[in-house]
Image (cartoon, rainbow, N blue to C red):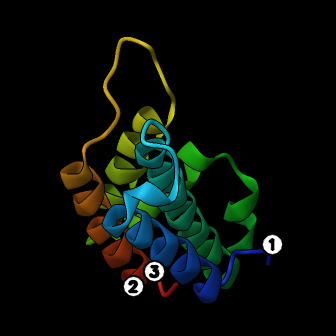
Amino acid sequence: MAAGVTPAGVDRRLAVADRLLREPELVEAAVWPRACTWLIRIAVEHAVDGYWARTIPAVATTNRRAQFVVLRHREPDVGPAAEELWSRLSRAAHHHAYELAPTASELRTWHGEAERVAAVLGA
């Protein structure tokens, strides 16, 4: 299993994201929403990586999109939601001058969804 791809690694990233949501002054005002987004996205990715490492290690060698296609079929209760969450986080994580950063409310929602995905996937 790659470094950080452990239940503790997922929990640690979600805990830091939660702290940023509660204390955004810890980093520069313009930075905290994207930093929080990246932490949540990485937590989701590590939860998925851990799931594949435990269930079908060969799937872990495919690209992320392929992993989510297989996950939708293997885990229909969480796979589609995990894929949608990852896509939203991916879009939000990349800064574009013409787009606003995610709001605290969006980030809190995504954080809760990431906790659910991690719990169901066993991370």
Task: Locate residue 97: give its quadrant.
Answer: top left
Element carrying mark 2? helix
- Tag 2: amino acid: Ala
CA gap between label 3 and label 1 equals: 17 Å
- Tag 1: amino acid: Ala
Please name the residue that numbered disc 2 is placed on. 119
Q: Are marks 2 and 3 in contact (CB under 8 Å)?
A: yes
Please name the residue that numbered disc 3 is placed on. 121
Q: Does residue 31 appear in the picture of this structure?
A: yes
Q: Point out the tag, 1 or 2, that comes first from the N-terminus.
A: 1
- Tag 3: amino acid: Leu
Q: Is residue 119 above or below residue 80?
A: below
Q: Along the horizontal axis of the image, is 86 left or right of 50?
A: left
Image coords of residue 59 (percent x, y): 67, 62
Q: Is residue 116 above or below residue 42?
A: below
Toward the right, the furthest residue is 2
Element carrying mark 3? loop
Element carrying mark 1? loop
Task: Locate residue 88: give its quadrant.
Answer: top left
Image coords of residue 28 (percent x, y): 50, 44
The numbered mark at residue 2 is 1
Residue at image x 31%, y 77%?
116
Of tags 3 and 1, the one toward the viewer is 1
Q: Along the horizontal axis of the image, is 9 left or right of 38?
A: right
Instruction: Give the quadrant of the N terminus.
Output: bottom right
Image coords of residue 23 (percent x, y): 38, 65
Viewer-nearest residue: 114 or 75? 114
Q: Does residue 74 appear in the picture of this structure?
A: no
Residue at image x 47%, y 73%?
14
The numbered mark at residue 96 is none
